[in-house]
Image: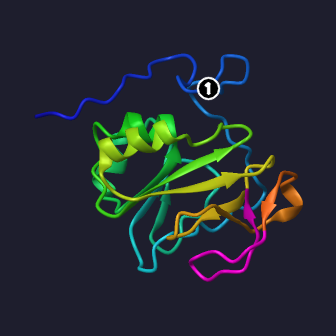
Amino acid sequence: MPLRIPHLGRGRVPHASSADSPPRRMTFYRHSEREKFSNPLPVPCRIAVVAPNFQDKDGVRSFDEDQSSEIARFLPEILAGTVPVLLRLAEVVRISRALVAFSGARVGPVTHRDRDLLWSAYQVPIFEQCLGPNGKVIARECEAHDGLHLYLPQHYHGKVRTEACPCGRAEPRIA
């Protein structure tokens, strides 16, 4: 039986309010230097990142969202992008290990509903990575899935949790 993925079409993201919803096609900030993508798994993988601000290095390759056939031919084990992009690619791209869903002020939060939709579409673990105002990753979810470890605290001004994470890392986490 074919998988039924909600059609997001043009317009606003369905889970966000219309006042602060990002447009259908997300525009990322471009850095003068691309950053290295952090694999959420402890093993090397082929990783397709649908965002312009990451280095093509160590098994990571960046794509535009309209390159779905190229992404599928790359045979990624991990796919990273915003929730709407990941849902659109579910019809074409198969993933064997994990998804990375980008969140942040410009792309909105990753909600429980988003996680449910992504799980239904791919049936692999989902890791969130939060983008700061300049498009750099400022926080990453670990394998314990108990909050986002804050790596660039100078770019985050909300509440943080300082107790130890079940994964054993000591960095503060976004509350």
Dominant secondary structure, magenta: loop
**Quadrant where the N terminus is found in the figure:** top left
> Where residue 55 appears, x then y in whole percent?
60, 64
The quadrant holding residue 35 is bottom right
What segment is highlighted magenta in the picture? 162-175
- Name the residue rendered at 63%, 61% in the picture: 147
Q: Relative to residue 169, is residue 78 depicted above or below?
A: above
> Where residue 13 appears, x then y in whole percent?
55, 25
Name the residue type under label 1: Ala
Q: Relative to residue 5, is residue 125 depicted above or below?
A: below
Look at the image and say whether residue 16 sits in the magenta stretch. no
Residue that lies at the very extreme toward the left in this rendered image: 1
126 or 79, nearer to the observer? 126
Horizontal arrangement in the rendering, residue 109 relative to residue 14 (left or right): right
Which residue is denoted by mark 1 in the rendering? 16
Mark 1, secondary structure of its residue: loop
Horizontal arrangement in the rendering, residue 168 relative to residue 160 (left or right): left
